[in-house]
Each structure stands twice: as C-alpha cells, then as structure tokens.
Amino acid sequence: MDEFQTAEEASFLVDEVSSIIKEAIESAIGGNAYQHSKVNQWTTSVVEQTLSQLTKLGKPFKYIVTCVIMQKNGAGLHTASSCFWDNSSDGTCTVRWENKTMYCIVSAFGLAI
Amino acid sequence: VSSPSFKQCIESVLGKADYNHNKVNQWTAAIVEQSLTHLVKLGKTYKYIVTCAVMQRSGAGLHTASSCFWDTTTDGTCTVRWENRTMNCIVNVFAVAIIL
C-alpha cells in the first residue's frame, strides 16, 4: 500500500497533466478569435499557467512546457518531438485544441530528478 | 549546445525541397532523430528533448512559446529557425542535466 502511494506521488500522470493543460488553454484563449496583437500574451499565459499548476503538484520533476498557436487559413503544420530520457520515470503529454479561427498545441514534458 | 549543427540537420533534410504534404511527416521525424543522435554522441550526462515544427508558408500567423521549470545553472535550451520559399521550420532543443 505504501509503495503504491509513493509511486503515484513521484510519477508523471498523463491524465492529471492533460486536464491542467486544457484548463490553462480555456482560460487564456477560451472564447477568443485569432488576433495578431494578442497572440504573444496568449502563448505566454498558457505556458506560465500550465507550468505553475504543474509545479504546485509538488512532485520531484523538472518541467518543460511548449505552446504553438496557429491561425486557421489552410496552411499545413506538422510537429514532431523526440526524447532521450528515462522511460520508467519521465513522461510527456500533448493537447491539441481548436476553435473557429485558430489551433493551439501544448506539450508538457516531465523529467524526474 | 551549438545551433550551426542543428541548422545543418535541417538543411540536409529539407534543403532544396518544397512543402509536400505527403513527405512532411518523414521530414520532421528525420530532423528530430538526427538532432537527437548528434546530441547523444556528445556523451554528456544529459536528458534531451528535441521538437520540430514545419509549416507551409501561406500567410498564416504562427506563435510559439515555451517555459521551463529546472535548474538554471545546469540546464539549457536552443531554438533554431529556418525557412525557404515554401516552408518554415522551427527546432527546439532542451537539455536537462542528470543528477547522479
């Protein structure tokens, strides 16, 4: 029982991280339409909010959060990522979100200390 | 972490090509894999994350941001932007020290 609890406390839980990311996106860009002058603030606030919620989890992890916002106008966008780490303790979670005028892709990486 | 070598990785994969929907997946995969291999060969005690975004140039706006919670004395990042007539490519490299 004790071992299970410790494992939970020190592991990267994808569902938990995914809901943190979704909340951050909704609150930063929720009902908005793509606006060139605001996008910088939006990407910054999505990553900052996500990062601060992740660190509040108090787990022994280092985190990297990236956010891409793209205007919808028919252009193709492809992203890929590759990681060299410890498969048993490290993890990643990517959330794709969209509304009528833009796409938002947020990736969070957690590396065990 | 030096950017010239990542620029080379991108050049060798995308070099003279035009945006091609069918090939983009292979390209992004090749770029991250080559970059990661290059980093691992440096033989340092680091964990690495490499991300690559390739976008067709059609006038759409694209913004990216990243934020990191780590040890600022040992960890670092490097971003390389590349473009040609038909596409933009952004590669991000994150290096996190392993504490032994």
Image (spheres, helix red, strand yellow):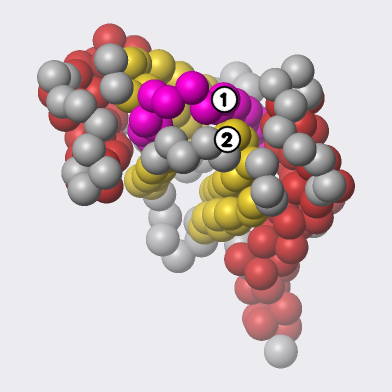
Label 1 lies in what chain?
Answer: B
- Residue B79 vs A30, above or below: the answer is above
Query: Disc 1 and disc 2: Cα gap in Å?
Result: 6 Å
- Residue B13 vs B78, above or below: the answer is below
User: Residue A38, located in which quarter of the rendered image?
Assistant: top right
x and y percent of residue A10 in the render? 66, 63
Q: Amino acid at mark 1?
A: Gly
x and y percent of residue A28 in the render? 82, 41
Question: Do the numbered discs 1 and 2 sit on residues whose CB atoms are within 8 Å?
Answer: yes
Residue B61 got which mark?
1
> As drawn, is B43 to the left or to the right of A43?
left
What is the chief secondary structure element of the magenta stretch?
strand
Q: Residue at x 61, y 66 (%)?
A: A14
Q: Is residue A112 inside the magenta stretch? A: no
* Residue wearing tag 2: A70
Q: Residue at x 64, y 53 (%)?
A: A97
Quadrant position of the N terminus of chain A in the picture: bottom right
Q: Amino acid at mark 2?
A: Met
The front one of B72 and B52 is B52
The kind of secondary structure element at disc 1 is loop
Disc 2: CA contacts within 10 A as few (<14), some (14-19) or many (>=20)? many
Stretch in magenta: B51-69
- Residue B76 vs A9, above or below: the answer is above
